Structure formats: structure tokens, C-alpha cells
Image (spheres, rainbow, N blue to C red):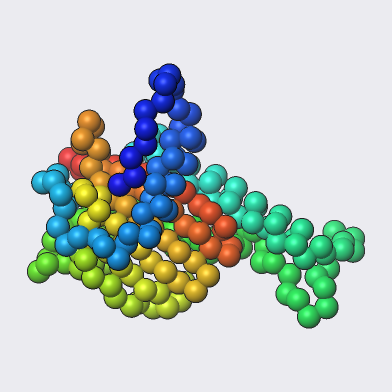
Amino acid sequence: MIKFSPLRRARRLHPGSVTALLASVLLGALAACSHLSETPSHAASITGDWVLEPANSDDFDALLRQAIDTQDKKLRKRMRMPSVGDHDVPPLGMLPPEEPERVHDRLAEDLRPGNTLKISWLEGTLQISADGEPARSFVPGHSASRIDVTGAGQITSGWDGDHFQVRTKYSGELRLQSFAIDAASGRLIVTLSVKSDALNKLDVISRYHRAG
């Protein structure tokens, strides 16, 4: 992982700054995804049944709407669409941007962090299931292709130290998920970073405690 030099003066980081800092580390790690290991560097296990802690996690919907609105404004400014009444009129031959609310509903269904997670090992594959849905299987240190609601994607997964990372590359979209145990609290920290044509950039950190 990237190491940062200590600051001359210790200071308290705003939660948003912490989110941005962790997300930048994750996005910086994308270049090293091809070197992900088959085994973690430490024995801390991310397996088990986990329950989301909303109060200690980022507000997914707020961050998603902010990312969509920012990108929508950029697209409309780039297109320089004139307005007629209450509607923007795109240049001839160019489709208008999708309405932000429709983009939100579509992406939220696909990206929203699960309220519960079940992580387990099965015959050398890491199984991750959210909210009781069928588990997704990942073979650490290997890549695979998949087709889902987003389209055709290339997935690379494995360990970067004690962080299990899943990188998914679609046409016009790149996602990185990281799963790691916080040594101080024992929580599971799940970080999602997305860069796409629809979002530009989205960074969400979710914290889970063990069920029971």
C-alpha cells in the first residue's frame, strides 16, 4: 500500500477527507492489481457474517446523487444545450443526458452496499454474498470475465497485503472494492471506488460488525 510521510503537525481529518484519502489510495492501487497475491500477508480473516453500521458508514445515496449531479452539470455544459421553456434542447443528432433521478435509481440498485454480508471460502474461492443474494465467487490472484446488468466486464481479484481487492473493468467504467479488517475495532471495512461516464467519480466507505 502507499505510505504517506508524517505531517509536522498532527491534525484531525474531516470524515470527508478520510474518505477521499482512502479512496485515492485504492485508486492508486489499480495499477498494481495485476500483482495481487493469492494469500493475505496476515492471518486476520474477513470471512464471516457481517452487519452494516449505517451511523459509522458513508451516506451512499447522498454521495451517489452528488456524483451524478456533478457529472450531469459537466455534460450539459459541454453540450451547451439551449433551453426552450423548462426543457434543455440537445444539438441536432445528439441525445440528451439521462435524467439524474433515473441514473440514480439504476446505479443504486447495482452499487448500494449490502445491509448484510456473508463471506466464506469454498474450494479455493472467496464467496461474497450481500443481503442473501447468490454469492459471487472470486479466485485470488486470477482474472475472469463476466456479463451482468452493467455489461461485459473483466474482473481481477486478490490480496494486497491484508486487503482483499476486486477490480472490475467495464466499457466506460472502472470499479474497485476493498475488504479489510480494522485491527483496532475488529470491523470489516468495505471501500467502493467507481470512475465512469455516468458518475465521473464515486467513493463510499461502509463499516460492518460481526453478526451475533
Looking at the image, the residue that sits furthest to the bottom is 93
Q: Is residue 1 found left or right of 140 in the rendered image?
A: right
Q: Is residue 57 found left or right of 130 in the rendered image?
A: right
Q: Is residue 37 found left or right of 175 in the rendered image?
A: left
Q: Is residue 144 above or below residue 41?
A: below
Q: How many numbered discs sit on the rendered protein? A: 0
Query: Does residue 135 show up?
Result: no
**Is residue 87 or residue 16 the one in the foreground?**
16
Residue 45 screen position, x and y as percent: 15, 48
Quarter of the figure with residue 208 = top left
Tell me which residue sits at (16%, 53%) in the image: 40
Q: Is residue 137 above or below residue 68?
A: below
Q: Is residue 191 above or below residue 105?
A: above
Q: Is residue 77 found left or right of 47 in the rendered image?
A: right
Quarter of the figure with residue 148 = bottom left
**Is residue 100 or residue 5 the one in the foreground?**
5
Query: Does residue 175 show up?
Result: yes
**Is residue 95 or residue 80 the one in the foreground?**
80
Residue 18 screen position, x and y as percent: 43, 35
Tell me which residue sits at (17%, 40%) in the image: 212
Residue 69 screen position, x and y as percent: 65, 52
Tell me which residue sits at (30%, 47%) in the image: 1
